[in-house]
Amino acid sequence: VASLEAGVAVVSFSGDKLLGGSQAGILLGGSDWILRMKENPLARAVRLDKLQLAALEATLRLYLTGAADDEVPVRYMVRTPEKELKGRAERLSKEINRVLKPGLVAKAVRTTGVLGGGSSPDVEFIDWGVALVPRESGLTASRLEKSLRAGRPPVVARVSEEQVILNIRTVFPAQDVRLPGLVARAVRSAGVI
């Protein structure tokens, strides 16, 4: 809006990155410019279909009603307090250690998260995760990460300093109960237990 108020004719942005909803390229600007773009034959190839418009409308309604912070997943995850993330990471670490043999050690770790995306490429915040540290000679962080990703459902993690990091911010609290079992299955699939 500030760009338009400063005199920019048209602003384009990614609706999914800015709003956390469905994929949608959005154009804002003067009606004469928007109409000229709408009349271009390429507009037909890139316009939103009815399902995309309905999803975009539903997301915008969440913002208008003040429900976006609780209902839009990325906004909910970004707003989760550090204290809550730390507590969940500590509980999950204990539970993972309980269900696994000594071939792997889980520990709560403080990390740095990056929001990323086109609208916030450099926004960093304090994060908490569970570091899975392989102790068996046949299990490497890379092998465990691949096994987690190949599971059904997949568990997306990252490898850092020979540890697999599960970012707690990206896991809904209701999913915590499944995570220890999914880690145990991935370790078994990797051929260690």
Image (tube, helix red, strand yellow):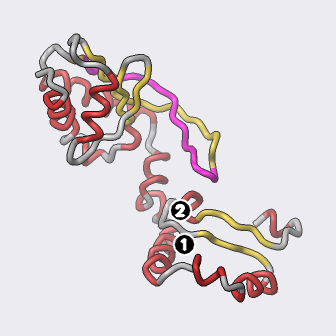
Q: Is residue 114 magenta?
A: yes
Foreground label between 2 and 1: 2
Q: Decide: is 72 above or below 43.
A: above
Q: Picture coordinates of residue 183 (x, y %)?
A: 21, 32
Q: Amino acid at mark 1?
A: Leu
x 20%, y 33%: residue: 186
Q: Nearer the viewer, residue 127 or 133?
A: 133
Q: Look at mark 2 in the image and give the residue it sits on.
A: 16
Residue range highlighted in magenta:
105-119
The number of discs equals 2
Q: Look at mark 1 in the image and give the residue it sits on.
A: 64
- Please tell me whether mark 1 sits on a helix, a strand or a loop: helix
Q: Tell which circle, 2 or 1, labels the residue nearer the N-terminal end.
A: 2
Left or right: where 32 falls relative to 118: right
- The C terminus lies in quadrant: top left
The quarter of the displayed image where residue 128 is located: top left
Q: Picture coordinates of residue 12 (x, y %)?
A: 70, 67
x 52%, y 29%: residue: 112
Q: Amino acid at mark 2?
A: Asp
x 48%, y 46%: residue: 79
Q: Decide: is 48 above or below 163.
A: below
- The N terminus lies in quadrant: bottom right
